[in-house]
């Protein structure tokens, strides 16, 4: 493992203080003792509860030096140079006497065999110690290591239950891919949970793993994990978009070397209520990857000045969750150009664009918008996104499909309905207005105990003044703009 090799090199190097920030204390201790054992270096661990304890000889702890200052004084005056691991020392780094003592020990140790290792989940080293220290970070497990953890956990389960763990290669590969970015400890726990419930690692364990992983990573609410993705069959029309996605599915989801460019993202621009948000969910559904939704509005709610940091953190989480879809709904509301907010939205957009240009992780952006004048031109420039799709009002065929989809969803028998007439009559309706008509028709039938029929739906249609009439001019402008710059989804 590269971890242990790097740590050995540091331990035998000349820098007297090593800091290790991690939640995985046991693994770090194991790595350190393995590295020091090879050189037969005496190794000690100090904690505020037990004082100093020699690890390489398994001696009893010396409790009389459990006070931080006493511990350091003892190390300083000890004739025995070796590895001294101070656990959770962070709170005592505020005391100037401790800082001075550490510095003095570091100067005695410099160039020698002695080493101080500060091991804690969090460390704030004072400036004057920074120059005498180096930081070691524990590697996250590689795919190979993850596979070994899975095998170990499966063997443990087999030994206790006397049964083999069922799984298949494809699911294992996907599990390994989904665990990437997590620590050893967390991966182990998630693998154990996946096995325990039914003695198998199956497709059905993957969403739970992703959800648990997301919870571990996300300490913020700027990004949310969307459980509801959609299937192809729930989205009427959009044939071109669907084909586009199908063609790229394997390049995006398979973690293999490819000469083809990995898809970066798309913008769905179009008329209100015509399925942009639904299409975004469909991307994750058909590719079988998690859907993360980035809420630009929430970024602003946070403390001033933290906005970009929040965005960067959210983007980082998305990278660790990759392959995934990052959905930015109603983009224009988050980064409208010309906002009077001391340039925050400009900087946010800059951060997003830079990240998009540099990212190598498989994070596919699906942004949606329905106002062109509010869209920043930098984003629309060719090459930023793979494609800008235009979502127009549905045509006759798609309208009748949308009717059927929504009756199906509610398990309503529609054998009495003449879809040609209904689709013809609902010209100019958006998908969401059609859904509304379906729901109203169902309720008026329930009230009179009638079976749903064409006349009832036609009545609902006639009672509606669709947005395409109310906002005819805006839609016309949108179409004219989109005509030259975008690709239609159908
Ligand atoms: N092509 C479609 N196929 C099936 N249902 C659709 C379609 N278009 C719209 N709908 C229905 O209308 C609802 C609203 O659509 P959606 O929220 O995706 O529209 P939108 O384009 O994102 O609108 P907005 O601009 O208001 O955000 C969907 O949840 C879905 O039920
Ligand atoms: Mg929407």
Image: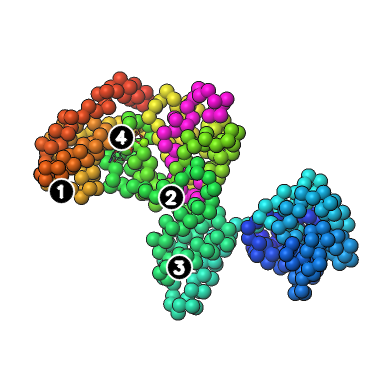
Instruction: Tell me if residue 467 is in the magenta stretch.
Output: no
Colour scheme shown: rainbow
- The first of marks 1 and 3 along the sequence is 3
Residue at numbered disc 3: 195
Disc 1 secondary structure class: loop
Residue at numbered disc 4: 274
Asked whether, in this view, residue 163 is left or right of residue 69, the answer is left
Residue at numbered disc 2: 290
Figure label count:
4
Measure how far apart labels 2 and 1 are at the Cα level.
33 Å
Image marks 2 and 1: residues in contact by CB distance under 8 Å: no
Can residue 60 be seen in this snapshot?
yes
Q: Nearest to the eye among marks 2 and 1: give it.
A: 1
Can you name the residue that lies furthest to the bottom here? Answer: 162
Asked whether, in this view, residue 450 is left or right of residue 15, the answer is left
The yes-or-no answer for disc 4 within 8 Å of ligand 1 is: yes
| Residue located at (77% from left, 46% from top) | 126
Q: Position of residue 214 (x, y in %)?
A: 49, 52
- The first of marks 2 and 3 along the sequence is 3
Asked whether, in this view, residue 76 is left or right of residue 269, the answer is right
**Bounds of the magenta segment:** 318-346
Residue at numbered disc 1: 413
Image marks 2 and 3: residues in contact by CB distance under 8 Å: no
Asked whether, in this view, residue 421 is left or right of residue 182, the answer is left
| Residue located at (50% from left, 28% from top) | 378
- The first of marks 2 and 4 along the sequence is 4
The yes-or-no answer for disc 2 within 8 Å of ligand 1 is: no
């Amino acid at each position: 493992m590269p971890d242990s090799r790097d740590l050995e090199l540091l331990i035998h190097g000349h820098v007297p203080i090593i800091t290790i920030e991690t939640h995985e204390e046991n693994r770090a201790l194991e790595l350190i003792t393995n590295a020091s054992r090879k050189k037969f270096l005496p190794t000690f661990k100090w904690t505020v509860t037990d004082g100093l304890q020699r690890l390489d000889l398994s001696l009893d702890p010396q409790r009389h030096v459990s006070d931080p200052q006493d511990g350091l004084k003892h190390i300083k005056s000890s004739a025995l140079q070796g590895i001294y691991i101070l656990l959770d020392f962070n709170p005592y780094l505020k005391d100037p006497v401790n800082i001075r003592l550490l510095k003095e020990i570091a100067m005695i140790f410099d160039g020698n065999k002695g080493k101080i290792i500060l091991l804690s989940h969090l460390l704030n080293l004072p400036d004057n110690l920074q120059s005498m220290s180096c930081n070691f970070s524990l590697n996250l497990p590689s795919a190979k290591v993850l596979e070994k953890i899975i095998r170990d956990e499966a063997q443990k389960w087999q030994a206790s239950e006397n049964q083999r763990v069922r799984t298949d290669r494809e699911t294992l590969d996907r599990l390994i891919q989904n665990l990437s970015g997590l620590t050893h400890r967390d991966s182990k726990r998630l693998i154990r949970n996946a096995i325990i419930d039914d003695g198998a690692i199956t497709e059905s364990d993957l969403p739970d793993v992703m959800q648990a992983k997301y919870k571990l990573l996300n300490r913020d609410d700027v990004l949310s994990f969307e459980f509801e993705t959609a299937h192809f069959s729930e989205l009427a029309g959009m044939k071109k978009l669907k084909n586009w996605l199908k063609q790229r599915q394997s390049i995006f989801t398979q973690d293999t070397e490819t000469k083809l460019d990995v898809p970066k993202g798309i913008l769905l621009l179009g008329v209100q209520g015509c399925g942009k948000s639904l299409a975004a969910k469909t991307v994750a559904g058909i590719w079988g990857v998690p859907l993360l939704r980035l809420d630009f509005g929430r970024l602003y709610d946070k403390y001033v000045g933290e906005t970009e940091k929040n965005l960067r953190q959210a983007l980082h989480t998305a990278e660790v969750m990759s392959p995934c879809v990052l959905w930015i709904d109603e983009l224009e509301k988050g980064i409208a150009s010309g906002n009077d907010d001391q340039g925050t939205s400009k900087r946010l957009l800059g951060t997003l664009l830079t990240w998009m240009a540099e990212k190598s992780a498989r994070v596919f952006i699906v942004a949606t918008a329905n106002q062109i004048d509010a869209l920043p031109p930098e984003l629309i420039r060719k090459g930023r996104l793979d494609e800008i799709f235009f979502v127009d009002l549905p045509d006759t065929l798609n309208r009748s499909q949308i009717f059927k989809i929504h009756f199906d969803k509610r398990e309503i028998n529609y054998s009495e309905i003449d879809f040609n007439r209904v689709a013809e009559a609902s010209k100019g309706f958006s998908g969401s207005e059609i859904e509304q008509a379906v729901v109203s028709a169902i309720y008026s039938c329930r009230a009179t105990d009638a079976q749903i029929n064409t006349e009832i739906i036609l009545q609902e249609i006639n009672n509606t003044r669709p947005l395409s009439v109310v906002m005819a001019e805006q839609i016309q402008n949108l179409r004219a703009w989109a005509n030259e710059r975008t690709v239609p989804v159908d």
